[in-house]
Image (cartoon, coloured by chain):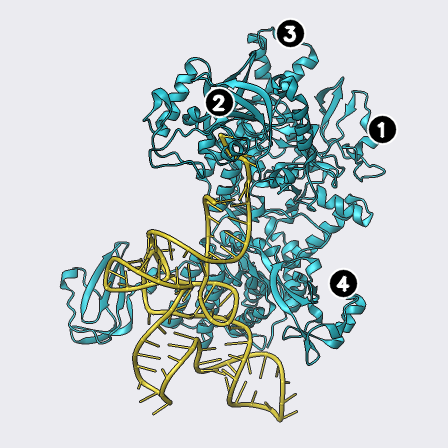
Amino acid sequence: MQYDFNKIEKKWQKHWEKSRLYSQYDFSKPKFYALDMFPYPSGAGLHVGHPLGYIASDIVSRFKRLNGFNVLHPIGFDAFGLPAEQYAIQTGQHPETTTAKNIENYKRQLKNIGFSFDWEREIQTTNPNYYKWTQWIFSLLFESWYNPHSNKSENIKTLIDKFEREGFEEKEWKEYSNIEKENILQEYRLAYQKDTYVNWCEELGTVLANDEVKNGLSERGGHPVIQKKMKQWFLRITSYADRLLSDLGNLDWPQSIKEVQKNWIGKSVGAEIYFKIKDLEQDKIKVFSTRPDTIFGVTFLVLAPEHKLLNKITLPKQKKVVQNYINETKSKNERERQQNKEANGVFTGNFAIHPFTGESLPIYLSEYVLNSYGTGAIMAVPAHDERDYAFAKKFNLTIRQVIGDDNSSIEEKPLVTNKGKLINSKQFDGIEPKEAQKVIVEALQKNQRAKTKINYKLRDAGFSRQRYWGEPFPIIYQNNVPKLVEDLPVRLPSVDSYEPTGEGKSPLSNNLQWVNTSEGLRETDTMPGYAGSSWYFLRYMDPHNENEFAGKNNIQYWQQVDLYIGGAEHATGHLLYARFWTKFLFDLDYLPFHEPFQKLVNQGMIQGESKLLFTGDRWLHVPVNYVSKDGKISKSSFLELQKVNKRFEGLKWDNLSHENDMLSLKSQSEKMSKSKFNVVNPDEICEQYGADTLRLYEMFLGPLQDSKPWNTQGIEGVFRFLNKLWNLFLVEQEVRVDDSQPSEYALKTLHKTIKKITEDIEAFSFNTAVSTFMIAINELTQQKCNSRDILEPILILIAPFAPHITEELWSRLGHSSSIHNEQWPSFDDSILKETTAKYPISINGKVRTAIELPKDLSKLEIEQIVYKDPIVLKWIENKEILKFIFVPGKIVNIVIR
RNA sequence: GCCCUGGUGGUGGAAUUGGUAGACACGCAGGACUUAAAAUCCUGUGGCCUCACGGCCGUGCGGGUUCAAGUCCCGCCUGGGGCACCA
């Protein structure tokens, strides 16, 4: 008899909402904050991959509730940004309309699954009550600078005080004009403007941050990205580079994410070395090197094509060649620059002077030197660096080995190593590289020709977007000096057209009424997608507060997010920015913690199963509903498909290889997407099997962190399990649970299940937890167990996983309060403690299945072991697990751990 | 090229971290119930040999440590992800 999941689930979802079950808090209890990465509501709606992480966090939230925690488990929507705007443009609607519609759809889908979200705390980043505070944090960043002495952010006033006291660059502060003052302060503000090369995407009509560009293409849409010089807002995340790196160590995050962030920050310790230029007294070329020990191997210098000294350095006869080269590089996009593997560059005609030997070193420029890293100039050591080596070979430059011994050779390739001894290095010969790095820098430092320096790959984050659908900046320009707008929020005005202008300006610039104010001109760029998501976890603590981003008491109570679940694709974007903003707010005493997410778990991707048809020269995705059960497509289905789907037009049945009027298809697991016809909608599963089955099955599929394919066949097993559960409690709608004494075996089943489930949830091993339920229910069914003392605790264990069916059964058992407010059962170790041998074993002539082991090990006498196989015995004494291994005839080993 | 991760039956995946490999589930085969089907229940299900008892081989490949290796060590092959002129 199947249970009526649809009726039951709807009933309880309504009831929970009405009784505000998940919106009630008891602040006398310890807190637990479980957070999901809030979704970006796309037009396509949720597919079964989306809820995976939400289900896991919901299980943990409910588990913590049952364990006496006051749980914060909120949800909201991240709705500003490019995708929503692109979608709106495509469908010809206002992004506000489409966003609202998409959010409604998402909410409906999410509510179907029965999460314990507190919907009363829902936030939307596009809501002015929310983005008011995003703008407020931007204002704080604008009004702050990073003080390297206190090693934290401070109000810009402390910097101005300093300038007023000490002056700036040998001039009194008051002698500077307002514009000059602002230009100086912009060098320090954490939100500042800079006229520089940025990632410009023509197709999207906007600038992108580094993490939004992959392989020279935009992450969104895959359009080419070029370097364009533009005046842009930036956030000075580089000030936090060191803290962002070193604090990674204390976080309970997946190793891979920590690794990615570490590489992204890319700290390298080395030295800045200054090279004099021939016949150019006042200027020096600064280079950055992690290998100052190889300085005697330097035979030339290379500058980036954008290097600011190039003009001065280049000799007249080389001007033309150099200019040509610069123009050529400029016209290439980043991708083209990276693809060029062969060394290329040109000579400036000028020379630098070696700080030790006085030797003349030719100065080149080449695109392999990046202007944005280090100083935009390098000292080339061809003997010990791949790129320098290739460059030297191409231009026939000297290659001088300075590390190694008689056996090492640089004939064929460079010797990239830090092992060995220095050679050809005058007074430093014989020193090991590591030591040499120190002494050589020290020697250079004496004459102000070098200093130790730490460099990061991390760049400041571009914060301007030339698009409509984002938070407006709270900035007005008065005579070109940016001033903060006091009255927040600055609302996003309506515009006639929100399509990109194509001139590098935001659509907002067309709304002149909005742009022109009595105070001055408004900033017309908008903030990037990550602005709203960098602090949303704080707003959930106090989402309706109109006077603060969140009240102090609330922040003090909820503290960090205890568990954060979401995809790994945000490693270098959202997760880094959120850490940055948290540290910033911590510095300004707005937060009592400096890391947002203590524990992070990445859920894997659920892949769809695509069906592909080979047409003779390519593979075509076939919609699943045309495919037969054995993965083939019949002639009639194929002809029908041709009528409705353009992709299949023009194909001739007779030209395809078929057998018995059936075409064979290939199966393939890949990311779910509409165009691949492999999307599975959770609504369908809820309709067919119910939300509880969906929840259990998603957990049962495999480890949360792994990518795994979705196959609908396996879902039957989980559905059967829930029916068995139902039938264990009820016979023809009659409760069969009574107050009978539980059998010893049933008690054992209960306690081992409590133990296993508790451990599994704590270890995020939800798939094995579901298996454990199945085993328990099978055992109890076979035993015909009907004891309330067993079945009620079992029901509580299952409740976090399948909240609806357990709630229904709980109420049928006569309870008037919700099962989700119950107490998590505890297990009795003594019931499980006795050591049992799985096989009979003979000790002192008696064959037993359970063995009591004497406390004194020396008294243990074994006469004979009946079975040939090794037998393992374990028991716990004084919290230590003692383990005996018996092999044929003797004790071979005693392990005490 | 560098850095993370994985590799176990027909399939998804277990294995108390060195202790009976394949739990649980799907699929498949056989059986019960049924006029029949669906649903449900029972039995079997890594491979090879054997009527059977039982035996041999088996966790990507090749070595090693150990009484004992999916698990530890060394050398390869391979899937996935990230970074990639970062000086």
Name the amino acid, label 4: Arg
Alpha-carbon neighbours of circle 4 within 10 Å: few (<14), some, or many (≥20)?
few
Residue A326: which quarter of the image? Answer: top right
Q: x, y percentage for residue A160?
A: 60, 14
Lateral position of residue A786 relative to residue A198, left or right: left
As drawn, A638 above or below A133: below
Give me the C-alpha separation between circle 4 and circle 3.
Answer: 71 Å
State the separation of the CA atoms marked 3 and 1.
Answer: 36 Å
Amino acid type for the residue under numbered disc 1 = Gln
x, y (%) of residue A802? 56, 62
Q: Which mark is residue A174?
A: 3
Mark 3, Cα crowd under 10 Å, few <14 / some 14-19 / many 20+, is few
- The mark found on residue A513 in the picture is 1
Chain in yellow, by letter, is B
Residue A417: assigned label:
none
Q: For the residues carrying marks 3 and 2, which lies nearer the camera in this image?
A: 2
Which residue is drawn at the image coordinates 24% and 58% (left, top)?
Answer: A895
- Mark 1, Cα crowd under 10 Å, few <14 / some 14-19 / many 20+, is few
Tell me the chain of label 3: A
- Residue found at x 41% / y 21%: A441
The chain carrying label 1 is: A
CA distance for labels 2 and 4: 59 Å
Q: Examine the rendering and report whether any part of residue A554 can be seen.
A: no
Q: CA distance from mark 4 to mark 1?
A: 48 Å
